[in-house]
Image (cartoon, grey):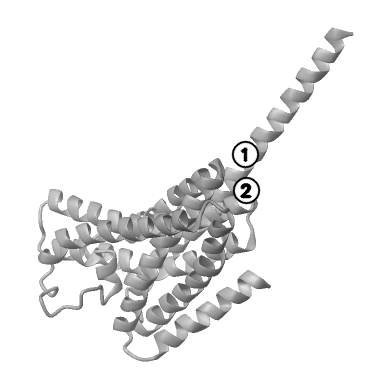
Amino acid sequence: MLTFFADTFLTMYNYNRQRKQVFITNTIMTLIAATAIAGVAGTGLGGLIGALFKKDSNRTVSLLLSFAGGVMLSVVCFDLISEAIETNVGIFIVIAAIALGVLVTFLLNYLIDRKTNPEVPHIDVNHPKTADDLDELIHSDHLDMHHARKDNKLSLMVAGVVMACAIALHNVPEGMTIGASYAINGGVLGNSALILAVLIGLHNIPEGMAVSVPLIGGGMNRAKAVIITALSGAPTIIGALLGYVIGDMSTLGLALSLGFASGAMLYVVFGEIIPQAILMYQSKLPAFSVIVGMFVGLIIIYI
């Protein structure tokens, strides 16, 4: 009799463990698939457009970026930060996590800009203190300059690494917002995570265009340039996994993940996307586009 109960217990234990392992595997694979579409496919599509047309419209890119920034603001402020507060770890911990996300993203951007800006001739004392073109934001203009000067392979490689770091710096926090939002729903791809993935994918299209055009202009094969451009969106997946794993650890981990990702995204939106969108298309329309984006974000969250 004891043997029977022991065998039954072991069978049930193994069955439950296998189910848990399958659930975790499916959860991770779904998260990777969603962020791969947002990061790799979105950037790759932009790279393909850049390879085919080799041009973009500042007006279209500006309005697209500002609209995506508005939706991100709504999702971050009215969903992610609200969820972080509702973990009840304390408002000051949430504020500290948000502030840390802002500070880390700012400092990393500052270090990259300080290294590259003096090497780009048109960035002088009269230049705006933020990027006025998408090429500047991801530092593809820096790589393009090295191609134009026909510098040695080491210089080109360093410029390529810098550009990859600049792209990763934007994509990792974007991915973290998806992962943290995913953790809120217990490993289920909820509306906020899904919408964030779609929006980040749209936001990555003009970014992909900015990557592929200078690569092709420097003599790279179009197919290779599109592949490299698509792979530059891979850090989104890393960010999503970080956001989910940290958020799934504990209530405190969830609050820290949500707060840090929210802070990083707030800096990206207010410190880069919106100023750049206004500089690219100097009119009132980018501001209205942000507001419309925020309304759409509210509809997404509450309907």
Residue 102 x, y percent position in the rendering = 35, 61
Residue type at numbered disc 2: Gly
Q: Is residue 280 left or right of residue 303?
A: left
Q: Which mark is residue 230?
A: none
Q: Is the residue under label 2 in contact with that under label 1 (CB below 8 Å)? A: yes
Q: Secondary structure at mark 1?
A: helix
Q: Nearer the viewer, residue 42 or 278?
A: 278
Q: Nearer the viewer, residue 147 or 268?
A: 268
Real-space Cα distance between discs 1 and 2?
Answer: 8 Å
The answer to whether residue 18 is visible is yes
Residue sitting at 60 percent across and 49 percent down? 30
Q: Earlier in the sequence, mark 1 or mark 2?
A: 1
Judging by the rendered image, the residue that carries numbered circle 2 is 187
Q: Is residue 136 left or right of residue 274?
A: left
Residue 285 x, y percent position in the rendering = 41, 89
Quadrant (top left/top right/bottom left/bottom right) for the C terminus: bottom right
Would you identify the image quadrant in which residue 121 lies? Answer: bottom left
Judging by the rendered image, the residue that carries numbered circle 1 is 24
Would you identify the image quadrant in which residue 169 lies? Answer: bottom left
The answer to whether residue 247 is visible is no
Residue sitting at 32 percent across and 71 percent down? 271
Against 196, residue 24 (above or below) is: above
Residue type at numbered disc 1: Ile
Against 299, residue 247 (above or below) is: above
Would you identify the image quadrant in which residue 298 lies? Answer: bottom right
